[in-house]
Image (spheres, coloured by chain):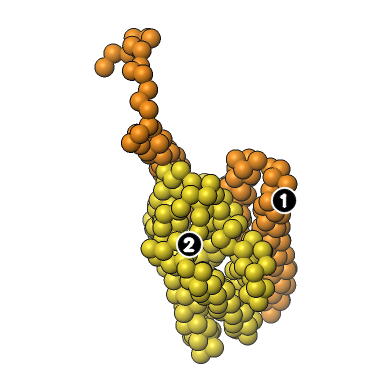
Chain colours: A orange, B yellow
Amino acid sequence: MEHTHTEAGHEAAHADSSTKTIWRTFWILLCITMVEVGLAFLHLETGFPSRVFLNAIFVGLTVVKAFYIVAEFMHLGHEIKNLILTILIPLLLFVWFIVAFLYEGDSWKNMRKDLKPGTPVEAPKAPAKEGHHY
Amino acid sequence: MDTAVTAKKKWWAGGYSPFNVSYGKLMMWYFLMSDAFTFGALLISYGTIRFSSPSWPDPNEVFRSFPGMGHANLPLVFVSLMTFILIMSSVTMVLAVHAGHMRDKKAVAKWMIWTIIGGIAFLSCQAWEWTHLYHEGAWWGRNPFMNVDGTLASTNFTNFFFTITGFHGLHVTSGVILNIVILANVLKGTYEHRGHYEMVEKVGLYWHFVDLVWVFVFTCFYLL
């Protein structure tokens, strides 16, 4: 009887603190979204944070939001290391994936621009300065 | 936190899950990981095409309408509302999972109902947005919006927009259906009888994943 009672008390205390964490996470996510939208409006009105700088902030804040959703809402932050690493390590592939494909896209854009019919052909390149042997 | 305990306990020696979660939950994580790669592939192909295009339509020009506001220029406002709805429904989902740990059947049912309402509200918003864009002449294979530099845009923009938000909307739809199934089981007392509410946690993982994907879709299509 005594035991059950303490158990229940412990559960209730635990309940309170995790409900607090849930709402704290909610406010963090909401604030980040509001900051993002606010910055977008600031850019529209004044053009202040330059486009490149703004995009870097947006991507950074998105990763922060993703972290809070996965760690708190999906509870991954409270699982054991084996599970966390099993989920996160394969996702590292995305780093290569994004870099490679965006680089590829950019290269296509440049080729389309440089090789468009009617584009004046640049003078043949001077022979390589340093010894690049193929 | 539990490193000392973890080190002493031989996680890979057999006898229990080395991940300290049930089989079902682990498989849900694996499924979500594969789904993350599917969405990642879609979003990265969108990025590749966008990087390979000399110019692209300005999202603030395209997504600037709000229901009942006529032609008022309100970029980002409606999609912020949609984001808020989805985050909110994620919160009610965690609260349902939490109530499940407490074995509080009534509270689980209450929070599940709120989550379902949130999901349906999000889908309704998306339906409105799609209908609105459709009436403006946008659809797969049709793009009425100009590029930022004033040149005629290709249909890549609308094709990617409808495909990716559509695929996400499909996930939300199936999430709502799963939530309804789980809610029915909660009300029937299936989990009370079983002694735990782990099924609520599993659909919860799926539901948060849908929210997670939206965070990326929101950034890629509306902010960047």
Q: Report the chain holding disc 1.
A: A
* Element under disc 2: loop
Question: Residue at (46%, 53%) from the top-left corner?
Answer: B152
> Outermost residue toward the top?
A130
Amino acid type, residue under disc 2 in the picture:
Pro
Provide the residue designation for mark 2.
Answer: B144
Indicate left or right for B70 with B157 as reference: right
Q: Chain of mark 2?
A: B
Q: On screen, B188 above or below B128?
A: below
Q: Residue at x 43, y 67 (%)?
A: B139
For the point 53% across and 46% down, the residue is B149
Front residue of A15 and A57: A57
- Per the image, the residue denoted by label 1 is A45
Which of the two residues, A73 or B16, is positioned nearer the viewer here? A73
Left or right: where A104 falls relative to B82: left
Badges 1 and 2, same chain: no
Residue B76, x across and y down, in percent: 63, 61
Q: Amino acid at mark 1?
A: Glu
Instruction: State the separation of the CA atoms marked 1 and 2.
Output: 25 Å
Circle 2 residues within 10 Å: few <14, some 14–19, many ≥20: some
User: Is residue A11 something one can see in this rendering?
Assistant: no
Asked if one can make out residue A9 in the rendered structure from this viewpoint, the answer is: yes
